Amino acid sequence: MGVWDFIQNQVLGMRWLNDLLGTGLSSLGLDVNGRIGGSVQFFIYDVLKITILLCVLIFAISYVQSYFPPERSKRILGRFRGIWANIIAALLGTVTPFCSCSSIPLFIGFTSAGLPLGVTFSFLISSPMVDLGSLVLLMSVFGGKVAVLYVVLGLVIAVMGGTVIEKLHMEKHVESFVLSAGSVDIESPGLTVRERLLYAKEQMLGTFKKVFPYILVGVGIGALIHNWIPGDLIATALGSNNPFGVVLATIVGIPMYADIFGTIPIAEALLTKGAQLGTVLSFMMAVTTLSLPSLIMLRKAVKPKLLALFIGICAVGIVVVGYLFNAIQFMMI
């Protein structure tokens, strides 16, 4: 086993934990190869793995994020023009909170501060879709190449989506209270290393409490798919024989509300049961970027025409990414 395989399987994937749990459950009399025992093993393993990765990642990312408060992020974005501003906004979105609902208040703040609308939408698209946490988690399940390509294509959607909105001059479709709110540019005080560590700890605990219920639900659904739903059924609906599998997965994902930590176990189970890689990734993107609660929140800040444009751009981008990944998977077979 190479160094990278060891990192992916044993460090990020924590296969040792799965083996340990299998041995422990077998000693208690559970058949881990059966439906009930397999479901219990899947549930405990994924909850522990995702929780450990969640806490480590949020702590590290929050420490980095302490150097990029909204005021500083606004000043950074204000230095760039054109497509470079969209690229920087998309990249800044990778170090912000993990769910779309958490990103919308920052989007409103940036817009009210006078930043170009297309730039703020690039941030809004990339923030939930591609963050540092998703990169590491995707690596633990799908491997490094898939994870990097997922993040790159997500950033492309964010940049192109923001650019299209900017070119269409949609400012009149932003609610007036957002444009007239203004912004007080308060200089963030310099923080010591200890203060940044305390901030990271608080963010980790706060996010964990908010996200953990969705992890339990996501892992529960994953365990159900993994051990109780026939693989033929998943393969028929989301496999290569259904040319509309990507579209179906995208549509199914939109009403759901979860973040990357809650969707990973579902995606992992779907892939194991025969769903195509691109179809699974489209489902993940739809859940994290176009969840119904976040769209309801966004509607408070933008008018229906702009909201519909945002949904359309994201949905088309997600579907294209799904079919692209499926084509790559087909060529590799």
Image (tube, grey):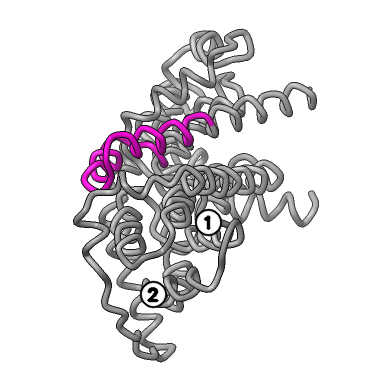
Under mark 1, the amino acid is Ala
In percent of width and height, residue 243 lies at 59, 11
Q: Is residue 190 above or below residue 90?
A: below
In percent of width and height, residue 159 lies at 56, 49
Q: Is residue 298 above or below residue 190?
A: above
As measured in the structure, the alpha-carbon distance from the residue carrying label 1 to the one carrying label 2 is: 16 Å
In percent of width and height, residue 96 lies at 42, 61
> Is disc 2 surrounded by few (<14), some (14 to 19) or many (20+) residues within 10 Å?
few
User: Can residue 168 be seen here?
Assistant: yes
In percent of width and height, residue 44 lies at 40, 42
* Residue closest to the eye, 287 or 220: 287
Q: Which residues are magenta?
A: 288-316
Question: Quick one: SS at disc 1?
Answer: helix
User: Can residue 15 be seen here?
Assistant: no
Question: Quick one: SS at disc 2?
Answer: loop
* Left or right for 330, reference 209: right
Question: Which label's residue is closer to the chain start, 1 or 2?
Answer: 2
Determine which residue is flagged by label 2: 69
Determine which residue is flagged by label 1: 90
* Left or right for 71, reference 247: left
